[in-house]
Image (cartoon, grey):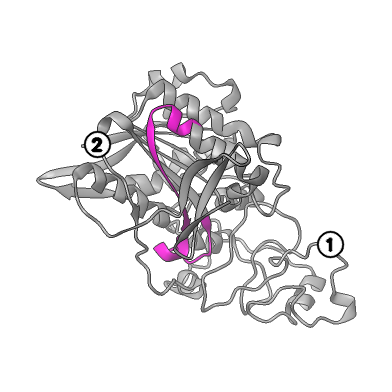
C-alpha cells in the first residue's frame, strides 16, 4: 500500500525525506509513502526540494504564497492519501515574540485544516515548535487541536524530543498525527529508540566532512569574535564564560543562552535555528568559528548528498527551519505500522485534548508531567 503525500509549507524536504525512507513490510505487503505534490513560498527552498525530492517531476512543487493558492490546482497535480504540513513557527517559537494567533504567521495553520477538509486524506502529520504549548496562554494549541478534530480526525498530539530518536540535537517539536475517523486505525506514539543520545561530535566528525563538500563554506569571523571565542569553553556562552571587560556583550534584559555558545562535543547540539544576528550561528566546541552549513545539516540528520540551493544565508535559513528526517522517519514508520496492523514499542502521548472547566467556563489543555496530566 502506497500513500501519496501532499505537503504544505514543505521547507527544503526534511519531512519528505523522512516519508520517502519510511517503509514497512507485513503479510507480504509493502507499506510506503511517495511524493505527490508540495508547496512553499520561498524560491530557494522550492528549488532545494525539487532537486532532492522530485527531480523528475519539478512541476509538482508549487512556489506560491499559500494565502493565494488554489487547492484545486494541487488536486490537478495528483490526488493524495496523506497530508503533511509544518506550519510556520515564527509566532510560536520561544526565540521570537510568541505573538501566537495575533501574529502574521500564527493563523496559517488554518490552511492545513482547509486542505484536510478538501482532500480528506487517510492521515496527516502536522508539526510545530514546542513553544506552541504556551502561545496565547495555551489557547492556540487548544484551538488548533479542536479544529483538526472537527474536520473528521482522531488526533494524537505529542511533544517529541528528537534527541531520543537518534537526532544529535536537542530539538523539541510538537507533532500531531491524525487518522481519519472512518478508517478505524489506532496510532500510538512510538517509544524513543535511542537510550544514549547521539553527540554532536559523532554527527560532525564521523565520517569527516570532505573539505570541498557542498554547502561547507566557512563563515568569516571578525578578530573580536575570534578573541571572544577563545575565552568560551565547550558548553559555555557569552554570558556564562569569564570574559575580559572589552569582550563582554552590552545586552540588557534577557540573555539568550545560545549567543556565542560553543557546542559540548559529548552531548547533542542545542537547537539549530534558521535566523538570528551575530552570535547565533552555533559555534564549534574547539575551533574559533561558527559551524558550516554542512555541519549544521548533519546536526539536522540530512545526508551529505542532500544539496541546498541558494546563498549561504538562505541555506542557513532552510536548514534551521527544516524538520530532522531521522526523527520524523520513526513517526512515519509508526503510522505505516498502524495501518499494517504491526505492533511496535509505544508510549503514552504527553499532550491530551482539552477538557471543559465548569469553574471558569473555559477549555483547558492537559500536559503529561511526572506521570500525571495537569492543566497547561
- Pick the quarter of the image with the N terminus: top left
Residue 287 in sight here: yes
Which of the 4 quarters of the picture holds residue 89? top right
* Residue 91 seen in render: no
Where residue 108 sits: x, y (%)?
59, 32
Q: Name, please, the residue furthest toward the left.
A: 28
In the image, the segment drawn in magenta is: 147-172
Q: Tell me the residue that label 1 is attached to.
A: 253
Using the numbered discs, state the Cα–Cα distance from disc 2 to disc 1 in whole angstroms. Answer: 52 Å
Instruction: Please identify the quarter of the rendering in which residue 348 is found.
Output: bottom left
Q: Is residue 248 above or below residue 8?
A: below
Secondary element under disc 2, as helix, strand or loop, is: strand
Does residue 369 lie above or below 110 as drawn? below
- The front one of 70 and 369 is 369
Q: Nearer the viewer, mark 2 or mark 1?
A: 1
- In the rendered image, residue 177, in percent from the top left (x then y), is placed at 40, 42
In the rendered image, the vertical position of residue 316 relative to residue 357, given as above or below: below
Q: Which residue matches tag 2? A: 2
Amino acid at each position: 500500500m502506497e500513500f501519496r503525500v501532499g505537503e504544505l509549507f514543505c521547507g527544503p524536504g526534511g519531512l519528505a525525506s523522512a516519508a520517502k525512507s519510511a517503509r514497512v513490510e507485513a503479510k507480504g505487503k509493502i507499506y510506503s509513502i511517495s511524493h505527490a505534490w508540495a508547496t512553499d513560498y520561498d524560491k530557494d527552498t522550492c528549488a532545494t526540494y525539487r532537486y532532492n525530492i522530485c527531480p523528475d517531476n519539478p512541476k509538482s512543487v508549487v512556489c506560491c504564497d499559500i494565502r493565494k493558492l488554489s487547492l484545486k490546482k494541487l488536486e490537478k497535480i495528483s490526488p493524495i492519501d496523506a497530508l503533511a504540513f509544518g506550519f510556520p513557527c515564527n509566532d510560536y517559537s520561544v526565540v521570537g515574540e510568541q505573538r501566537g494567533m495575533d501574529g502574521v504567521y500564527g493563523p496559517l495553520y488554518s490552511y492545513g485544516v482547509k486542505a484536510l477538509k478538501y482532500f480528506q486524506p487517510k492521515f496527516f502529520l502536522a508539526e510545530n515548535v514546542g513553544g506552541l504549548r504556551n502561545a496565547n496562554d495555551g489557547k492556540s494549541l487548544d484551538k488548533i487541536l479542536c479544529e483538526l478534530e472537527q474536520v473528521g480526525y482522531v488526533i494524537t498530539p505529542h511533544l517529541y524530543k528528537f534527541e531520543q530518536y537518534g537526532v544529535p540535537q536537542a530539538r523539541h517539536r510538537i507533532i500531531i498525527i491524525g487518522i481519519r475517523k472512518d478508517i478505524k486505525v489506532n496510532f500510538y506514539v512510538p517509544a524513543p529508540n535511542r537510550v544514549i543520545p547521539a553527540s554532536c561530535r559523532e554527527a560532525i566528525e564521523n565520517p569527516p566532512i570532505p573539505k570541498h563538500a557542498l554547502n561547507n563554506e566557512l563563515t568569516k569571523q571578525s578578530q573580536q569574535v575570534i578573541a571572544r571565542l577563545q575565552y568560551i569553553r565547550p558548553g559555555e556562552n557569552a554570558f556564562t564564560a569569564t570574559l575580559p571587560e572589552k569582550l563582554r556583550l552590552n545586552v540588557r534584559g534577557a540573555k539568550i543562552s545560545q549567543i556565542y555558545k560553543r557546542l559540548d562535543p559529548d552531548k547533542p547540539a542545542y537547537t539549530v535555528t534558521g535566523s538570528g544576528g551575530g552570535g547565533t550561528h552555533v559555534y564549534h566546541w574547539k575551533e574559533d568559528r561558527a559551524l558550516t552549513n554542512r555541519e549544521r545539516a548533519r546536526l539536522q540528520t540530512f545526508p551529505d548528498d542532500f544539496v541546498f540551493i541558494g546563498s549561504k544565508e538562505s541555506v542557513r535559513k532552510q536548514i534551521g527551519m527544516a524538520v530532522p528526517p531521522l526523527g520524523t522517519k520513526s513517526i512515519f514508520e509508526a503510522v505505516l505500522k498502524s495501518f499494517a496492523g504491526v505492533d511496535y514499542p509505544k508510549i503514552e502521548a504527553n499532550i491530551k485534548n482539552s477538557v471543559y472547566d465548569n469553574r471558569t467556563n473555559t477549555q483547558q489543555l492537559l500536559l503529561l508531567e511526572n506521570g500525571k496530566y495537569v492543566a497547561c
